Image: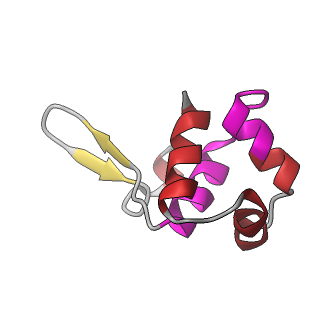
Amino acid sequence: MIGKILRNMRKSCNLKQSELSKIVNIPQNTISQYETGKIQPTFEIIEKIANACNYKINFVGKNITFNSKNIDREEI
């Protein structure tokens, strides 16, 4: 599922896999494998791709919302 999300983010920014790979410094074939579900990206990679495509990652709970920008990495 995350692969489809990553592909949709990339396509919404009109980027080719090769263009995104240069922006986030990840080999193009690795991006292809993420998108097809052959391998799973780490959260840090998902965050890099989201940032490159101007997306925010939000975690929504009952009474609170966190995003990748306001979480103190020391707390995790």
Give me the residue at 13% from left, 38% from top: 63
Q: How is the protein colored in the picture? A: secondary structure
Give me the residue at 50% from left, 43% from top: 76
Indicate yes or no whether the magenta region holds residue 50: yes
- Splitting the image into 4 quarters, where does residue 60 fall? top left
Q: Is residue 37 above or below residue 71?
A: above
Which sits in the foreground, 74 or 44? 44
- Look at the magenta stretch and give its main secondary structure: helix
Q: Give how far across and how far down residue 34 sits, in percent.
A: 72, 38
Indicate yes or no whether the magenta region holds residue 52: yes
The quarter of the image holding the N terminus is top right
Q: Give how far across and how far down residue 3 sits, in percent.
A: 61, 35
Which sits in the foreground, 45 or 27? 27
Give me the residue at 47% from left, 58% from top: 12
Which sits in the foreground, 66 or 41? 41
Q: Residue furthest bottom?
A: 23
Q: Is residue 48 above or below residue 62?
A: below
Which sits in the foreground, 25 or 16? 16
Judged left or right of residue 11, residue 36 is right
- Splitting the image into 4 quarters, where does residue 23 fall? bottom right
Judged left or right of residue 18, residue 68 is left
Q: Give how far across and how far down residue 61 sits, in percent.
A: 23, 34
Instruction: Tell me which segment is drawn in magenta.
Output: 32-53
